[in-house]
Amino acid sequence: MPEPTEEVDLLALDRQVCFALAVASRSVIALYRPLLDPMGLTHPQYLVMLALWEESPLSVKQLSNLLQLDPGTLSPLLKRLEAAGYLTRARNPRDERNLAIELTETGQSLRTQALKIPPAIIDRLGMTLTELEALHKSLTRVITAATT
């Protein structure tokens, strides 16, 4: 005899992907705060620095694309990082319309402190690197599906 099928409430809060993603995002970002505060960075500023530690200089457009942030959101972050002495913004001599964003020595040296962050987050989450990589892969699929 077949088992009776349960009626699933598709509007139940605890079944919502958007809810789980929102809570997970806020919770994980909150873990970064005590690690970033001594460096004088907010989480969005940290993301900018991560991109620039990989490649510097970058144009605002390149940085905007990498971080998936519109230039209007990115501009105040860059101004604050420049005021902190972590980067410079200068007109690209080859194309005056573009701003070149480049790390200063201070901004580059901050990377040494930042190397402590990933292991601390991995430890705090209590997940293996393999589990986190699988989660990253799944989230990247979600991002791709939601933005195409």
Image (cartoon, rainbow, N blue to C red):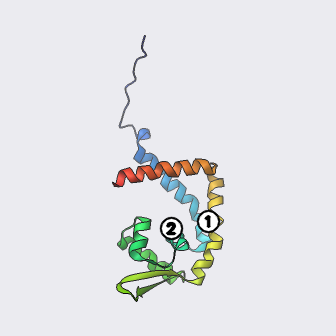
Nearer mark to the viewer, of 2 and 1: 2
At 64% across and 49% down in the image, what residue appears?
128
Q: Distance between the residues labelled 2 and 1?
A: 14 Å
Q: Can residue 22 be seen in this view?
A: no
At 60% across and 64% down in the image, what residue appears?
34
Disc 1 is placed on an element classified as helix
The answer to whether residue 47 is above or below residue 22 is below
Residue at far front of view: 94
| Tag of residue 47 | 2
* Residue type of the residue flagged with mark 2: Leu
Residue 118: horizontal and vertical position, in percent? Answer: 62, 61
Disc 2 is placed on an element classified as helix
Instruction: Answer with mark 2 or mark 1, whichever residue precedes in sequence.
Output: 1
Residue at far top of view: 1
Identify residue for label 1: 35
The answer to whether residue 87 is above or below residue 18 is below
Callout 1: few (<14), some (14-19), or many (20+) C-alpha neighbours within 10 Å?
many
Task: Give the quarter of the image for residue 36.
Answer: bottom right
Residue 12: horizontal and vertical position, in percent? Answer: 39, 37
128 left or right of 27 in image: right
* Residue type of the residue flagged with mark 1: Leu
Classify the position of the N terminus by image quarter. Answer: top left
